[in-house]
Protein backbone atom coordinates (compact mmCIF):
# COMPACT_ATOMS: atom_id res chain seq x y z
CA UNK A 1 0.00 0.00 0.00
CA UNK A 2 1.54 3.29 -1.02
CA UNK A 3 0.74 6.94 -0.40
CA UNK A 4 -0.58 7.46 -3.94
CA UNK A 5 -3.20 4.75 -3.39
CA UNK A 6 -4.42 6.44 -0.20
CA UNK A 7 -4.51 9.86 -1.90
CA UNK A 8 -6.43 8.35 -4.84
CA UNK A 9 -9.02 6.95 -2.42
CA UNK A 10 -9.40 10.39 -0.86
CA UNK A 11 -10.02 12.04 -4.23
CA UNK A 12 -12.33 9.27 -5.47
CA UNK A 13 -14.47 9.76 -2.36
CA UNK A 14 -14.61 13.49 -3.10
CA UNK A 15 -12.91 14.38 0.18
CA UNK A 16 -11.01 17.65 0.30
CA UNK A 17 -7.40 17.16 1.39
CA UNK A 18 -5.92 20.24 3.05
CA UNK A 19 -2.43 20.85 4.39
CA UNK A 20 -2.81 23.30 7.28
CA UNK A 21 -1.51 24.09 10.74
CA UNK A 22 -3.02 21.84 13.41
CA UNK A 23 -2.21 22.62 17.01
CA UNK A 24 -2.57 19.34 18.89
CA UNK A 25 -2.53 16.70 16.16
CA UNK A 26 -1.07 15.92 12.77
CA UNK A 27 -4.33 14.87 11.12
CA UNK A 28 -8.09 15.32 11.41
CA UNK A 29 -11.26 14.29 9.61
CA UNK A 30 -14.16 16.73 9.52
CA UNK A 31 -17.66 16.04 8.27
CA UNK A 32 -19.90 19.07 8.30
CA UNK A 33 -23.14 19.41 6.35
CA UNK A 34 -22.08 16.79 3.75
CA UNK A 35 -18.67 18.42 3.34
CA UNK A 36 -15.83 15.99 4.00
CA UNK A 37 -12.35 17.24 4.81
CA UNK A 38 -9.11 15.57 5.77
CA UNK A 39 -6.68 18.01 7.30
CA UNK A 40 -3.02 17.29 7.88
CA UNK A 41 -0.08 19.32 9.13
CA UNK A 42 2.93 18.64 6.90
CA UNK A 43 5.24 20.44 9.35
CA UNK A 44 4.69 17.50 11.75
CA UNK A 45 5.21 14.79 9.12
CA UNK A 46 8.76 13.64 8.47
CA UNK A 47 8.22 10.89 5.86
CA UNK A 48 5.80 9.60 3.27
CA UNK A 49 5.14 6.55 5.48
CA UNK A 50 4.00 8.76 8.35
CA UNK A 51 1.79 10.77 5.98
CA UNK A 52 0.33 7.52 4.62
CA UNK A 53 -0.50 6.35 8.15
CA UNK A 54 -2.13 9.65 9.09
CA UNK A 55 -4.22 9.85 5.94
CA UNK A 56 -5.26 6.19 6.24
CA UNK A 57 -6.49 6.73 9.78
CA UNK A 58 -8.44 9.81 8.76
CA UNK A 59 -9.98 7.80 5.90
CA UNK A 60 -10.96 5.24 8.53
CA UNK A 61 -13.02 7.93 10.24
CA UNK A 62 -14.77 8.55 6.92
CA UNK A 63 -15.44 4.91 5.99
CA UNK A 64 -16.60 3.84 9.47
CA UNK A 65 -18.43 7.12 10.15
CA UNK A 66 -16.28 7.24 13.27
CA UNK A 67 -16.83 10.86 14.18
CA UNK A 68 -17.32 12.76 17.39
CA UNK A 69 -17.62 16.35 18.60
CA UNK A 70 -15.31 18.39 20.80
CA UNK A 71 -17.54 17.80 23.81
CA UNK A 72 -17.95 14.02 23.30
CA UNK A 73 -17.19 11.68 26.17
CA UNK A 74 -13.73 10.13 26.36
CA UNK A 75 -15.38 6.74 25.96
CA UNK A 76 -16.96 7.72 22.62
CA UNK A 77 -13.74 9.36 21.41
CA UNK A 78 -11.74 6.21 22.24
CA UNK A 79 -14.30 4.00 20.49
CA UNK A 80 -14.28 6.13 17.32
CA UNK A 81 -10.47 6.38 17.25
CA UNK A 82 -10.25 2.60 17.62
CA UNK A 83 -12.58 2.10 14.64
CA UNK A 84 -10.57 4.47 12.45
CA UNK A 85 -7.24 2.88 13.40
CA UNK A 86 -8.67 -0.58 12.77
CA UNK A 87 -9.63 0.42 9.22
CA UNK A 88 -6.20 1.90 8.58
CA UNK A 89 -4.42 -1.22 9.90
CA UNK A 90 -6.52 -3.45 7.64
CA UNK A 91 -5.71 -1.32 4.61
CA UNK A 92 -2.03 -0.72 5.34
CA UNK A 93 -1.31 -4.29 6.44
CA UNK A 94 -3.67 -6.72 4.69
CA UNK A 95 -4.35 -9.82 6.82
CA UNK A 96 -2.87 -12.17 4.23
CA UNK A 97 0.43 -10.26 4.20
CA UNK A 98 0.49 -10.29 7.99
CA UNK A 99 -0.22 -14.02 8.05
CA UNK A 100 2.60 -14.71 5.56
CA UNK A 101 5.02 -12.55 7.54
CA UNK A 102 4.22 -14.42 10.74
CA UNK A 103 4.60 -17.79 9.02
CA UNK A 104 7.90 -16.70 7.50
CA UNK A 105 8.92 -15.05 10.79
CA UNK A 106 9.79 -11.79 9.04
Image (cartoon, rainbow, N blue to C red):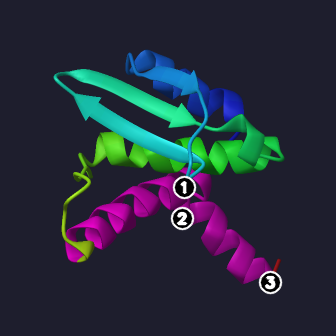
View extreme (front): residue: 23
Res 79 → quadrant: bottom left
Residue 105, disc: 3
Is 29 in front, or is 11? Answer: 29
Q: What element does badge 2 sit on? A: helix
Determine contact: label 1, label 2, CB under 8 Å: no
Please, is residue 2 above or below residue 71 in the view? above
* Magenta-colored span: 75-104
Q: What element does badge 3 sit on? A: loop
Q: CA distance from mark 1 to mark 3?
A: 37 Å
Task: Residue 13: give x, y in percent of width and height.
Answer: 38, 21
Q: CA distance from mark 3 to mark 2?
A: 15 Å
- Is 97 situated left or right of 83 in this image? right
Q: What element does badge 1 sit on? A: loop
Q: Nearer the viewer, mark 1 or mark 3?
A: 1
Res 7 → quadrant: top right
Task: Residue 100: give x, y in percent of width and height.
Answer: 69, 71
Q: Quadrant of the C terminus?
A: bottom right
Q: How many residues crowd mark 3 within 10 Å: few (<14), some (14–19), many (20+)?
A: few
- Whichever of callouts 1 and 2 sits on the residue coming sooner in the sequence is 1
Q: Which residue is mark 2?
A: 95
- Is 75 situated left or right of 105 in this image? left
Q: Which residue is mark 1?
A: 24
- Is 66 situated left or right of 10 in this image? left
Q: How many residues crowd mark 1 within 10 Å: few (<14), some (14–19), many (20+)?
A: few
Please, is residue 88 above or below residue 101 in the view? above
Amino acid sequence: MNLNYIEDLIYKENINLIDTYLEDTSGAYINYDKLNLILYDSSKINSSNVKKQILAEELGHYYYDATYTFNSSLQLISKQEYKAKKWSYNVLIPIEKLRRAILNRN
